[in-house]
Image (cartoon, grey):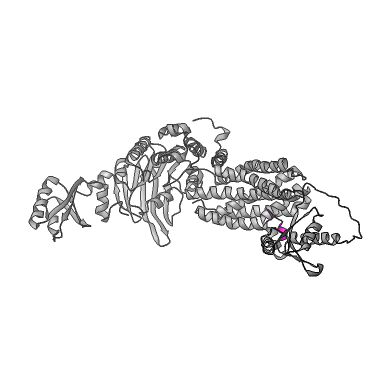
Amino acid sequence: MSERRWTDHPLVQLTRVRYREFFREPEAVFWVFVFPVLLAAGLGIAFRNRSPERTVVGVVGNGPAVADIVEALRGDSSLVASSMNDSAGVEALRTGDVALLVVPLAGGKVEFRYDDTRPESRSARLLVDDGLQRASGRRDPVMVADRLVRERGARYIDFLVPGLLGMNLMGSGIWGLGFAIVDARKKRLLKRLIATPMARWQYLTSFVLSRLTLLVLEVGLLLGFGVLVFGVPLRGSLPLLLLICLLSSLAFASLGLLIASRAQTMEGASGLMNLVMLPMWIFSGVFFSAARFPEPIQPLIQALPLTAVIDALRANILRGAGWHSLTGELAIIVVWMVGSFVLALKLFRWR
Amino acid sequence: MRTNHQGIALQVRKLRKVYHDVVAVDGLDLEIYAGECFGLLGPNGAGKTTTIEICEGLNTPDDGDVVVLGRRWGSDDRALRELLGISLQETQFSEKLTVAETVQLFRSFYASGPRPEDVIAMVQLQDKAASRVGQLSGGQKQRLALACALVGDPELLFLDEPTTGLDPQSRRQLWELIEAFKADGRSILLTTHYMEEAERLCDRVAIVDHGKIIALGTPRELVAGLRAEHVLEFALAGPQAFDEHPLRGIEGVCAADRRDGTYRLQVEELHRTMPALLQELRRQGAQLAELRTHSATLEDVFVSLTGRHLRDE
């Protein structure tokens, strides 16, 4: 018999098992660490702020009027006008290749054909109208000057990184706990464990401990990537940011525990997880603002844990919001954390 | 022999467990002496696993009393678990851990016990200590399960179907390990539906069917209870009618029955019964398709008690 080292403590052993199981599963490592960074990189590049895009419009019809219009619009650097025949024009408008069609009519009139629900078509209408009127000799009574302001923190990537961070915290918390526990139950490993003198709280605590350490890596990697590659600003206090991440991770871990508390099969568990996570992916404002959804369902959306997490992260990272302005979000997160945990302990089945 | 609980390691009285409308255990009594290896032998669904899991404190009885090492489940279960070694039916350990890591994990749950590497050596997995569990064969996994049952240096070992699904060689290897622990003076309760296993390992055997014990004794006593040392089985060719009544009158036949076209005779002395049987067959003009004899086993005890084979289901 040997002297017991601290590594022989069941909690240490159980937590190490969590790490081993996680890092020896390449897929899990990919989805938790690599995928969010790839997603941020892809979306960040796709929606990067470029020099203002040029709007393409088509001029259809025959005769000299067409050439005149194309010539008149050449003066506006934000417009590209090209002449095309009628059917090609209709096709181009339908597929969105052009934002608007300009059709010269008899008597010097001009018809605009466009879809008024498309924002770029509406702006194309203003630009083309402006160009044509000026070319015909309109004088503007008010002189205006443009001064361009491009601010870090207002770009899509700045909006996206906190969203992805929240989504990642949710995914790794719910999947990380849910699958591991249901798998152990299915393999009757849970039953085998409670046949030993192991304290049950130690098993559940090992998940919390491993989540917390993995959390540092997860958050560090994604935020580090956002800051270094895209220059996402970190305007809030770092301890507060860590606290938000910590509480969020625990809240989602509790939710994962709750989902896994009864499920006997992987299929049942993944169905439940998707059922829980899908609404949050859609409504909680990962990729676009949750404020876009109709007013009547806003209270529901605001009560979702991921909405609170992402709102808090954005407020901290982008606006530098302090403790006081985040109490609402933090309260929602804590309620989810405690509520799910208490319910999970009540429902949990070891067999 | 270790700690003495009046010489009784496990006592079960009037145990009853009902699942919905299925009676899994139906008033079962059991007494296992300290230092003995006791076998619950029976077909699948006989209630063996339910019984052993209630004894292990993993399932609760509807009725009855269970005393394990002088204690009852429900108060200070943790202290009791320190004294038990358990191998469940079909536990799959995490495939991503190595053998050494798995044993080390289980060792950490017990206050005292041998070193993990010593347990691994005991079950002869030294060469596999660094291998992932997922790469082990069925026999090696069962030996790992045994190692995890032994890390706490248990007084009482529960083994639920320790060799089910193993090839004969792995099975024999596991038997040798279990025999070694038995020699250590531990008490063992094992369930099995292999009669050879029960015959080889168990000091006493209880034959279980439909949640009840239908026979109890040493393997030798049970077989001797048949009053016949041999079993003679034969089948006939052709469709002609055969009168089985005269069979019982043949010299040395203790019992005769017929199942699925096979006649089965329990016989005291083969050399006297055989010629008489052949004469009877000739007299009725019957033709033999098959003829087998073997020494009586626990399987024959089960068949003679229930009319079914152990591994029918």
Q: Is residue A85 visible?
A: yes
Verify whether residue B237 appears in magenta: no
Q: How many marks?
A: 0
Q: In the rendered view of the protein, which quadrant contains the N terminus of chain B?
A: top left
Q: Main secondary structure of the magenta part?
A: loop
Quarter location, residue A93: bottom right
Q: Nearer the viewer, residue B274 or B110?
A: B274
Residue B210 placement (x, y as % from top left): 34, 56
Picture residue at 78% right of the left edge, 52% below the top: A325
**Side of A138 relative to B274 (left or right):** right
Q: Nearer the viewer, residue A58 or A53?
A: A58
Residue B298 placement (x, y as % from top left): 27, 47
Q: Residue furthest front?
A: A63
Q: Nearer the viewer, residue B69 or A193?
A: A193
Residue B37 placement (x, y as % from top left): 35, 42
**Side of B269 relative to B63 (left or right):** left
Q: Is residue A208 visible?
A: no
Q: Which residues are magenta?
A: A284-293
Residue A114 placement (x, y as % from top left): 73, 64
**Side of B24 relative to A335 (left or right):** left
Q: Nearer the viewer, residue B88 or A91?
A: A91
Up-down relation of residue B219 to residue A137 (above or below): above
Q: Residue furthest bottom?
A: A107
Picture residue at 40% right of the left edge, 36% below the top: B2
